[in-house]
Amino acid sequence: MDMEHKPPSKVLAFFRWYCNPDFREEIEGDLIERFQCYSKEFGHKRANWLFIKEVLLLFRPTIIGNIHLANKKSIIMTTQSKRLLFILAAVPILLLIPYIAMQFSNGVDWKLLDFATMGMLLLGTGLLCEFVLRKVKGTKGRILMCGLVLLAFLLIWAELAVGIFGTAFAGS
Amino acid sequence: MGEFEEIVLLTVAILDGEAYGVSIITEIEERLRRKVSLGAIQTVLKRLEDKDMVKSEFGEATNIRGGKRKRLYEITSIGKNILSQAKEQRNSLWDAIPKVVFKFT
């Protein structure tokens, strides 16, 4: 670049990051040409500010091209991480329900093993649902698979609690 | 077609093959004494190109542009027809204004 002044490199890098690659060359050329005109007319310092303003005003849906493509994976990862955190947080919160009930009623009498078993069951169900949501793409498929996981959870819970199938793990 | 789209399309026609982002801004600012941003111009140019009102091709790269090529815009026959229609509509509206309306202003 044979130029007297150069535009702020970080701002230019930000523009290059968000701009649609199909328009990048022409718009970057326009930006630099405008910057050179500003430098001659207003001086380097003001030109820098005007350059920043132009780059910010270019941040529009028509011009933005590759953000969602380049970062789609990381955005999905963020959503998945949030959901996983929600599942992990939901398990102890749900286990608090019988624990609190035990403080007020004799009808609920859970032992440590009960809490551990229910914790494993809830965590397993949540993680299986998370696995389904990550691997299955269609909405119908997700509903069906998650429905099956929840049904299995309810059946195992019922078996452990009251013994509907009469297995070795059946409760009474 | 919006008002700003019409202005940009007219400017592209005025510049006759020499229309690109910076030259369009300069022309509009000089003729209309109106500040426009590069973002607004580029958005409208892309929209006009999607509507086939303008076509574009890469021009030469210059040092002042950091070695980047210009994208030169040219009005298409569709763009010319739409501008003509817009002009006719405006003229018919102007012609419909009773002369007395402007007589005492």
Image: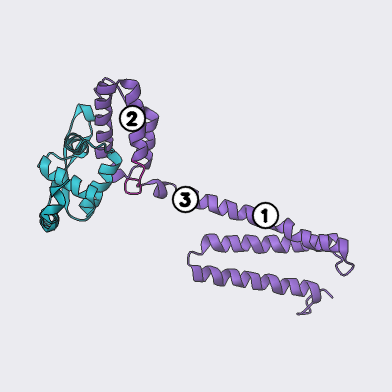
Chain colours: A purple, B cyan
Which contiguous range is marked in magenta? A58-65
Q: Earlier in the sequence, mark 2 or mark 3?
A: 2
Left-right relation of B11 to B42: left
Query: Which residue is drawn at the image coordinates 35% and 26% (left, top)?
Result: A48
Crowding near the residue tagged with mark 1, few <14, some 14–19, many ≥20 C-alpha atoms within 10 Å: some
In the figure, residue B31 lies in which quadrant? top left
Query: Which residue is drawn at the image coordinates 33% and 30% (left, top)?
Result: A50
Q: Which residue is mark 1?
A: A88
Spatial separation of the CA atoms under disc 2 and disc 3? 34 Å
In the figure, residue A117 lies in which quadrant? bottom right
Q: Position of residue A137 (x, y in %)?
A: 48, 64
User: Disc 1 is attached to a residue of which chain?
Assistant: A
Amino acid marked by disc 1: Leu
Q: Secondary structure at mark 1?
A: helix
Q: Quadrant of the image for the N terminus of chain B?
A: bottom left
Q: Earlier in the sequence, mark 3 or mark 1?
A: 3
Q: Secondary structure at mark 2?
A: helix
Q: Which residue is mark 2?
A: A50
Crowding near the residue tagged with mark 3, few <14, some 14–19, many ≥20 C-alpha atoms within 10 Å: few
Q: Position of residue B96 (x, y in %)?
A: 12, 58
Spatial separation of the CA atoms under disc 3 and disc 1? 22 Å
Q: Which residue is mark 3?
A: A73
Q: Position of residue A116 (x, y in %)?
A: 78, 60
Q: Earlier in the sequence, mark 2 or mark 1?
A: 2
User: Disc 3 is attached to a residue of which chain?
Assistant: A
Amino acid marked by disc 2: Leu
Q: Quadrant of the image for the C terminus of chain B?
A: top left
Q: Secondary structure at mark 3?
A: helix
